[in-house]
Structures are given as structure tokens and as C-alpha cells.
Image (cartoon, coloured by chain):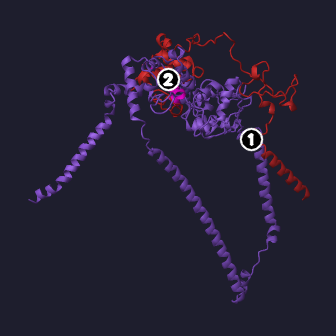
Chain colours: A red, B purple
């Protein structure tokens, strides 16, 4: 009986201690084989800057913590860096990056033409992209009545006044660099995607 | 005869009604033509109204400040030539060093007004319209009925919830009362039987029986059942606990900025892809950079309902000003030994974000919804039909599959259970 009691008490203790291993709020939960959860290579999204983290199981040659995976040579110990100054990224079409200055929207409107034809497929794709990146402010039908647009204020309707007449090059330029209170969306959508969105915006411009 | 008499009696009344009608119509015409009286051109006003609504209304109201200043009385504040020059090219006016323009520019957070390529007639029309609106004065605020109705619905649902609670509490009280009454009845009856009535032996045994608790507890059957229940509970806890090791389901870390997905993805319905730009194109969904926050928060500086700049939004501006990264805490962490690709699942497979991440649009703080174990992956790969529509890559596979099977092609059929698909 005595042995049984001790056995029971041990079991309860084990149960409670294991139950408390569950992840909750800020506690990530007990890790099984912790080395596997922490990336050895540099990882942009799960970066550990504390040199001593994981000291208790570290067998690293440099004597630092097992989980430390930041790059001390970069600003803020970051793992990602901006491209080297005065270099450009190559892309699949061999385009040079878009280089018209952000203040030259009207010039862009005069000189640029859409390299992507207006096919049903392109327009469908443009519509999908539009609904992701533009609808919040410009609204489903381009009336400037998106849920965010109503709070943001100053979002014009595509089919009225000055905006109705905007040439495709200027639409492309506006997506890339922003205009007035609209900020640049060049980092969100690629060059191709911008031209596809332009195709769809032109349809919205011409609605009544 | 009687008819004429009646008419005669009514003549004064009819006359007074007639005069009242004439008077009111004259008066209302008067109210309408205030513009004409002040020397404004009605035709010009209507042309100006169209121009104003199509171009200016986006940023300007006549009587209240919107993105730009309220325009009422602008013709008295500034000379007409200045107004025209500013509409045509505000940047030029500011650069010329015009004091008023420079102050205006700085007052409105250095927001440039778009240039409008209006003709002189159009400019005159817009100014004429603003003049006429200034004379009219601000519109009387009407109480919106819709908002009231919405509030009523909310109140109603709150009301019904309250009613249910009250009902349950009353029910509970009644049940307890019944229990008490029954107990009293039993004890009274026992008392009565004890004293008054002569009972047979059998009945006496029933009336005077005593409940021996100790005897029940000490019986082997009871001990056996209790031991079994106890051991089962402990064993279940231990096994559950063991399964929890290494599983981060429920992890909801505090982030450096109290960002609410409920507000952004829920209330404002911003598409997940807007901020998580990697979902369509890469392995990682990506955490948005500061410039993406600023796309909206350049102008939206207050939390809904607040009157002052939000301290949480201020953190974005600080990050930008100091050029420091915002160190978001990663919630979903798949070990390096397993490969997972967002684009493959979302863009190709057409799986909704919520399938794995749960009701993100309702979460104030993001919580890991799924356990991300291998069993969880495999369960889905065993049942999920492939999204092969309009995807030439799958055409031959589907053709081959359909020859041999009548069921839809699932992930398992194209090797979704192979070890090396995810572990390599």
C-alpha cells in the first residue's frame, strides 16, 4: 500500500508538471530537442540577438549560446541587408528597374505605355490584385469608398473629374511612387503586377 | 341656394388660405434666390458644383476641415488671382515664397495639393460655387436613423442575453427552493410516521433506515472503482502532458506593438496579402516592414474613437525616425527539419489562411491555432483534394489518375505522404 501511494503521488506530480509545459501566452511551451527549434543558419524572421541564449546546451566552437543566430556585422544585428548602393536587381524580363523620378508623374503619363495586353486573363488577374492591394482604400468599384478609405479621407473616385482622364503611365507611376497622400506601393507589387492592376483600374475609370 | 350661402360663409377662409399659399411660395422663392440677389450666376454655380464634387470634394468640405482646409469664405480671405494660381499649381505658389501659401503648407503636414488643369471659366465657376455655399451657411445636422437602428439591434441582443441570464438564475433559485421544500416534507413525514402511525416491521425498516457512509466507502467495489477512475485520470493527464511537449499550440506572445488583427483584418477587412507580401510568392508569409504600416498610418494616427495620437502608432513613427527595426516576435515556428511553403499552399493549392491559422480576423493578439505536428499535416494531405483547375502542371497527372480511379485526386496521390517531400 505504501509503495502504491508513493507511485500515485509521483504520477500526479509528473502529470501536473507535464501539464504546465503547455504553451500559453508568452510561454512557448517545453521544447523537445531544443536545438531543432532554433535555426542554425541566419533566419530573417526568427532572429536571436542574445549571445548567451541556449548556453546550457551549447557545444559551439565560438563558445556562444546554441540559439544565437545573428550577424554582428550588420546594423541592429540584422540578418537581412539592403542591396549594395548603386546596384540593381536583375529580373526575369531583363527590365532595368523603374527609374522615372517620383515627382515626374505627368512625364511618366506621357512616355509610358503598358507592355501587357488587355486580355481577359490579365484583367482577371488585375482584379484579384486590385482587391488585395487597392480595395481597402479605393473601394470595390474604385469610388474611393473602401472601409479604410472612409477613415483615411481624400481618396478620389476613378471615374470622376481629373482622375478619370489619367493616362496608364501615370497610373503605373502612382502605384509605384504614390501621389499626394497615397504612399508608394512599389515594394508590395512587382512591375508586371502593377501593369496588370493598371489594366483593371482603366476599366474602373471608364465606368459610369 | 344653400350651396351659395355655404360658399359665402367660406369665402374669407378660402381667401386667407390662398394668400397664405401665395405668401409661402413667394417666400420660398426668396430663400432660393439669395444667390441671385447677391449677384451670383446660377448657371455658373451649377457648373462649379459639378467640378467641385468631381475634383475638390475628395479633400475639401465647404464648412469643415477635411484633408485640406474648409473653403467657406476663401474669396474674402484671399484674392481671386491667388486662389486661381493655387488651384492650377499649388507647388509653384509655395515655391515662390508666398507667405500665406507656405504657412498653409506647413500647417497641413506638408501635404501638397494636386494641380488641376482648369480653364479660367472653370476656375470662376468653382469659386462662384464656393461663394454661393458660403452664403448658404453650414447644413443643419440630421440625426442619422441608420446608426440609431444599429445601436438598437446591439441593445436588443444584449437585452436578450440579459433575459436569459435572469431566467436561469430564477430557475436555479426555484429548483433550490423545491429541494428545500422536499427535504422539509420528508423530515416532517418521518417525524409523523415515527410518532403517530403504527407500522409493520417491513415499513419500519424503510422509515428508520440509516445511511452508513463508512460501510460504502470501505466496500471493495467502491475502492476498486475509485482506484480505476483515479488512475485513468492521472494516466490521461500524463499522456496529454507528454503530447504537449514540443507543441506550441496556444502560444500568443506579447508583441512590441499591440497590433490588433481584429481591427485590421476583421473590422477594416484589409486583405492578409496586403501586409504579408510573401504569401503569394514565397516560402515565408513575411512580417510587414515599416513602410507598409505607414501606407495607411501616414494619415491615420488615432485609434478608432480616440482623440489623440495613439502611443502604439507613435512606435511606428519612432521606428522610422530612428531607422530601427520593429522586433516582432515570431509566433509560428516550424523546425528547420521540415519544409513548408506558403505560396504552394495558398497560391497553388487555394487553401484559405484561416484553415491553418484559425480565426485570425477575430484575434486581438495572434495565437498559434494549429499544433503544426506532422500528424496534423498528414491528416490534411490524406483528405485534401488537389486544386487542379486551370493549372496545366496537373493536366497529365489528372488524366492518368482518372484512368485508374474514380475518386478525386488528393495530395497523397501525388506523393504528399513521401518523407522526402518535406524532410530533406
Q: Distance from label 1 to label 2 (Cα)?
A: 42 Å
Identify whether A189 is placed above or below B217.
Answer: above
Instruction: Kindly report the secondary structure that dominates the magenta region of the rendered protein.
Output: helix
Task: State the extent of the magenta-drawn residues as a range.
Answer: A119-137
Looking at this view, is B412 or B294 the one in front?
A: B294
- Numbered badge on residue B383: none
Q: Position of residue A172 (x, y in %)?
A: 51, 17
Identify whether A98 is placed above or below B140.
Answer: above
Residue B414 visible here: no
Identify whether B398 is placed above or below A13.
Answer: above
Q: Position of residue B292 (x, y in %)?
A: 61, 26
Looking at this view, is B233 or A13 the one in front?
A: A13
Residue B414, by quadrant, is top right
Is residue A121 rendered magenta in the image?
yes
- Numbered badge on residue A23: 1
Of the numbered discs 1 and 2, the one sitting upstream in the chain is 1
Question: Where is the C terminus of chain B found, in terms of image quarters?
Answer: top right
Q: Residue shown at 83%/28% (left/top)?
A: A66
Q: Chain of mark 1?
A: A
Residue furthest to the right = A2
Amino acid at each position: 500500500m505504501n509503495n502504491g501511494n508513493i507511485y500515485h503521488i509521483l504520477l500526479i506530480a509528473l502529470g501536473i508538471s507535464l501539464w504546465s509545459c503547455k504553451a500559453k501566452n508568452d510561454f512557448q511551451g517545453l521544447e523537445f530537442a531544443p536545438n531543432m527549434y532554433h535555426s542554425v543558419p541566419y533566419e530573417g524572421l526568427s532572429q536571436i540577438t542574445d549571445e548567451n541564449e541556449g548556453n546550457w546546451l551549447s557545444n559551439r566552437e565560438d563558445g556562444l549560446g546554441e540559439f544565437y543566430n545573428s550577424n554582428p556585422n550588420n546594423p541592429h544585428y540584422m540578418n537581412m541587408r539592403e542591396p549594395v548602393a548603386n546596384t540593381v536587381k536583375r529580373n526575369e524580363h531583363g527590365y532595368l528597374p523603374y527609374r522615372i523620378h517620383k515627382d515626374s508623374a505627368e512625364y511618366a503619363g506621357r512616355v509610358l505605355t503598358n507592355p501587357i495586353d488587355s486580355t481577359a486573363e490579365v484583367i482577371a488577374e488585375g482584379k484579384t490584385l486590385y482587391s488585395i492591394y487597392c480595395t481597402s482604400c479605393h473601394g470595390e468599384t474604385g469610388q474611393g469608398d473602401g472601409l479604410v478609405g472612409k477613415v483615411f479621407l481624400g481618396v478620389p473616385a476613378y471615374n470622376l473629374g481629373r482622375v478619370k482622364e489619367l493616362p496608364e503611365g501615370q497610373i503605373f507611376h502612382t502605384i509605384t511612387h504614390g501621389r499626394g497622400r497615397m504612399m508608394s506601393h512599389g515594394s508590395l507589387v512587382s512591375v508586371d503586377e502593377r501593369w496588370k492592376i493598371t489594366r483593371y483600374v482603366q476599366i474602373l475609370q471608364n465606368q459610369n | 341656394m344653400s350651396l351659395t350661402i355655404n360658399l359665402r360663409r367660406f369665402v374669407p377662409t378660402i381667401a386667407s388660405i390662398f394668400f397664405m399659399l401665395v405668401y409661402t411660395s413667394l417666400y420660398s422663392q426668396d430663400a432660393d434666390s439669395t444667390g441671385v440677389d447677391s449677384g451670383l450666376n446660377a448657371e455658373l454655380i451649377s457648373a462649379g458644383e459639378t467640378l467641385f464634387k468631381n475634383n475638390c470634394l475628395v479633400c475639401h468640405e465647404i464648412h469643415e476641415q477635411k484633408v485640406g482646409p474648409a473653403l467657406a469664405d476663401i474669396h474674402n480671405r484671399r484674392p481671386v488671382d491667388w486662389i486661381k494660381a493655387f488651384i492650377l499649381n499649388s507647388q509653384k505658389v509655395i515655391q515662390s515664397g508666398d507667405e500665406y501659401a507656405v504657412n498653409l503648407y506647413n500647417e497641413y503636414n506638408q501635404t501638397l495639393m494636386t494641380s488641376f488643369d482648369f480653364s479660367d471659366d472653370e476656375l470662376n465657376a468653382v469659386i462662384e460655387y464656393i461663394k454661393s455655399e458660403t452664403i448658404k451657411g453650414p447644413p443643419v445636422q440630421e440625426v442619422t436613423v441608420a446608426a440609431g437602428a444599429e445601436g438598437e439591434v446591439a441593445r436588443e441582443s444584449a437585452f436578450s442575453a440579459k433575459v436569459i441570464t435572469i431566467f436561469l438564475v430564477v430557475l436555479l433559485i426555484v429548483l433550490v427552493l423545491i429541494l428545500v421544500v422536499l427535504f422539509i416534507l420528508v423530515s416532517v413525514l418521518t417525524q409523523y410516521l415515527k410518532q403517530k402511525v403504527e407500522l409493520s416491521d417491513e415499513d419500519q425498516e424503510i422509515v428508520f433506515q440509516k445511511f452508513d457512509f463508512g460501510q460504502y466507502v470501505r466496500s471493495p467495489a467502491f475502492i476498486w472503482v475509485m482506484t480505476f477512475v483515479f488512475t485513468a485520470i492521472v494516466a490521461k493527464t500524463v499522456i496529454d502532458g507528454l503530447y504537449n511537449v514540443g507543441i506550441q499550440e496556444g502560444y500568443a506572445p506579447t508583441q512590441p506593438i499591440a497590433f490588433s488583427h481584429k481591427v485590421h483584418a476583421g473590422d477594416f477587412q484589409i486583405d492578409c496579402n496586403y501586409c504579408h507580401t510573401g504569401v503569394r510568392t514565397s516560402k515565408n508569409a513575411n512580417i510587414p516592414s515599416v513602410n507598409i504600416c505607414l501606407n495607411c498610418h501616414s494619415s491615420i494616427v488615432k485609434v478608432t474613437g480616440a482623440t489623440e495620437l495613439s502611443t502604439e502608432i507613435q512606435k511606428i513613427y519612432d521606428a522610422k525616425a530612428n531607422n530601427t527595426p520593429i522586433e516582432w516576435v515570431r509566433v509560428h515556428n516550424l523546425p528547420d527539419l521540415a519544409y513548408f511553403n506558403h505560396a504552394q499552399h495558398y497560391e497553388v493549392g487555394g487553401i484559405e489562411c484561416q484553415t491553418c491559422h484559425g480565426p485570425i480576423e477575430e484575434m486581438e493578439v495572434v495565437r498559434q491555432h494549429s499544433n503544426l505536428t506532422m500528424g496534423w499535416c498528414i491528416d490534411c494531405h490524406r483528405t485534401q483534394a488537389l486544386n487542379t483547375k486551370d493549372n496545366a502542371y496537373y493536366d497529365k497527372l489528372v488524366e492518368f489518375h482518372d484512368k485508374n480511379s474514380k475518386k478525386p485526386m488528393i495530395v497523397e496521390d501525388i506523393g504528399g505522404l513521401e518523407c522526402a517531400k518535406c524532410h530533406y
